[in-house]
Image (cartoon, helix red, strand yellow):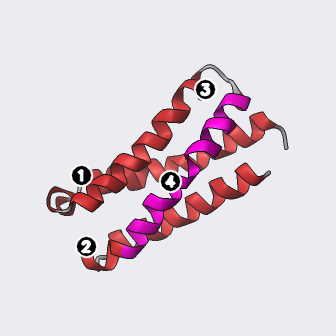
Amino acid sequence: MTDDDRMQQIDTVLSHVWMVRTFLKHSEEAEEDEELCEIHRALYDFMLALGGPLASNDPAAYLKQAAKKISKLRAASDLFAQIQPEISSHTNFKMAAVSLSTAVRQVDELLAG
């Protein structure tokens, strides 16, 4: 798999992260929980950091930036998995946690090559 292939696949996986971020950002629960706000901000920050290299079609810079920022994405996913049961037991929140952790695992795998 080429670096360009990996960049494109990571960007596709990040569409799931974006949907989780949007769901969390616009949830009523986010208005009341600072940790939940930190999570959706961390998801946004990860994707924002990759926007420039993606727009300039620079796979090397994209993958380097993704590798640099992946620990923050992992931490946000781990925190969400930890606090999700306290935030809400609604299926939407449960599925968001599963979706986020799956996407982060896939990004990790793609970065590992």
Q: Which residue is mark 3?
A: 53
Q: Which residues are magenta?
A: 60-82
Q: Counting residues from the N terminus, which is met first, the one under dot 1 or under dot 4?
A: 1
CB within 8 Å, label 2 to label 1: no
Between the residue at mark 2 and the residue at mark 3, the CA separation in whole angstroms equals 35 Å
Residue hosting label 2: 87
Which residue is disc 1 drawn over? 26
SS class of the residue under badge 2? helix
Crowding around mark 1 (Cα neighbors within 10 Å: few <14, some 14 to 19, many 20+) is: few
Question: At 48% across and 70% down in the image, what residue appears?
Answer: 98
Does residue 23 appear in the picture of this structure?
A: no
- Amino acid type at circle 4 is Leu
Q: Gap in Å between the C-alphas at discs 4 and 2? A: 19 Å
Residue depicted at x 57% and y 65%: 102
Q: Secondary structure at mark 3?
A: helix
Quick check: is 64 in the magenta stretch? yes
Left of 111 or right of it: where is 102?
left
Does the segment drawn in magenta span residue 28?
no
Can residue 107 be seen in the rendering of this structure? yes
In this rendering, is residue 97 above or below 57? below
